[in-house]
Amino acid sequence: MEIIHISAECYPVAKAGGLGDVVGALPKYQAKAGHYAKVVMPMYETKFLHNNEFIEDFKGTIYLGNWELPYTIIKEKNNILGFDLYLVDIKGLLDRTGIYNYDDDTERFMAFQIAVMDWMNHWEHHPDIIHCHDHHTALIPFMMQHCYSFKNKLEKIPSILTIHNAQYQGWMGWNKSHYLPHYDTWKAGLLEWNNAINSLACGVKCAWRVTTVSQSYMQELSWNSNGLENLFTHEKDKCSGILNGIDVEVWNPKTDTFLEHHYNAKSVVVGKQRNKEELCKQFNLDANKPLIVFIGRLVEEKAADILPNIIVSCMYAMPDSMNFLILGSGDPHIEWQLKNLNNQFANHYHVEIGYNEALSHKMYAGADFLLMPSRVEPCGLNQMYAMCYGTVPIVRSTGGLQDTVIDMGDEGGYGIRFNHAAVGDVHHSVYRAITVFNDSKKMLEMCRTMMNIDHSWEKAVGNYINLYNSVIEK
Ligand code: ADP
Ligand code: GLC
């Protein structure tokens, strides 16, 4: 089966979060299962672009309103990712060092989607499936079916939309509707939600099938999806949840190229201790005390805004009992608050502001606990990486966290779960963590249980293939 993934991120080409990890892994494991998977994404100015060889595949021109934009499709030459990678180069719009957060993101991702459609419109064959990821690519199902220049060729190809995060929807005013290639205006209602063009809502209406990245999050969307609750309730028959896997070729403490001390479930005690000592030395922390880490975007969705109060509350109530190490970037106010604590709790606390792939691996390996108080967590990969590295997850019971972590108080449990993204709940969970840390037998038992859980992609690949087959047969 030929599957075309269209996405704004793909690890290791460009990653801002879990979307990148998923689009870097799912096609690889689909290819290993004998399918022909391709990824199409914007050409940003990233290290990957400059360190690898590309060949030109196609040149064309699109229009964004009256703006004429030449584009080039380049293809990675040596299949080093395990699938064909195509980058869309649109000079002046996509060729920047960052992925998101530019004022003209609407124009950038609109142009990207139109270029992908225009290019595919020139293909001589039809792929079996178009698989779009998140709002940056969610207008594609509409364009395939209702834009006059594409529909003859593309409307019969089944499209799937996977929602990795429904908080971000790609809203734009109707004054930008002229960016879309000429479309059947009778169908304008498909673009709209709450008096604006809403890319994600449009994708949910137009894609043949919609998936999200855990079953619990799928259910949550009907009562908590940033304004789209009624839409998800209405469209529930074509929606399903497929839990992400993790790429065990990248995330494996036995082989991780970012680690100096490798280990497996047998050597976990010594292996983790070595990684922990190194990390504690680097950040001047106390390696004899439990090390609790947070890795992620410093935004409300991740409940990063309560981190400063959690740290203050735990440090005062349980002095000298634990270390906190935080890695992340995001809201400047949260960054500032967290940085201010660096001096106040030196020797037991440190925050590193920024994005650092290598450090994140070292933290999964060296930490005793990983904290995820997320208000919204569609799947969450961090807790799965942590478990794979024998690090006990402390998570709020929501979305994918709820589907992947069993509380240590329950039968067969290995993690710590709490209900509210509130200082009190997290404080109590940290207390439970410190208590269990002193019970080395229980800690080892939990480590080994977690490290033996199968989080590989095979199961999810099978579920996606079944879903594709169900629409192809139609
Ligand atoms: P989300 O995609 O919502 O941010 P996920 O849990 O799915 O959350 O995935 C987050 C991914 O991004 C993980 O691979 C995590 O290690 C990584 N990550 C997040 N913030 C950072 C950071 N500051 N430095 C390095 N890696 C990070
Ligand atoms: C999103 C979600 C996260 C999920 C990731 C990959 O960024 O916030 O929970 O794990 O996508 O699907």
Image (cartoon, rainbow, N blue to C red):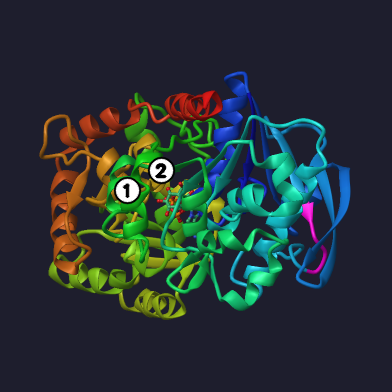
Nearer to us in this view, 110 or 154: 154
Name the residue that disc number 2 marks.
Answer: 213
**Is 407 covered by the magenta stretch?**
no
Q: Position of residue 249 (x, y in %)?
A: 54, 30
The answer to the question of whether label 1 and label 2 lie on touching residues, with beta carbons closer than 8 A, is: yes
Q: Which residue extends farthest front?
A: 186
Estimate how packed mark 2 is, as few (under 14), some (14 to 19) or many (20 or more) residues with alpha carbons within 10 Å: many
Callout 1 secondary element: helix
Quadrant containing the N terminus in the rendered view: top right
Q: Position of residue 96 (x, y in %)?
A: 73, 65
Question: How many numbered circles are shown?
Answer: 2
Nearer to us in this view, 9 or 130: 130
Res 240 visible: no
Disc 2 CB within 8 Å of nearest ligand 2 atom: yes
Q: Amino acid at mark 2?
A: Val
Dot label at residue 217: 1
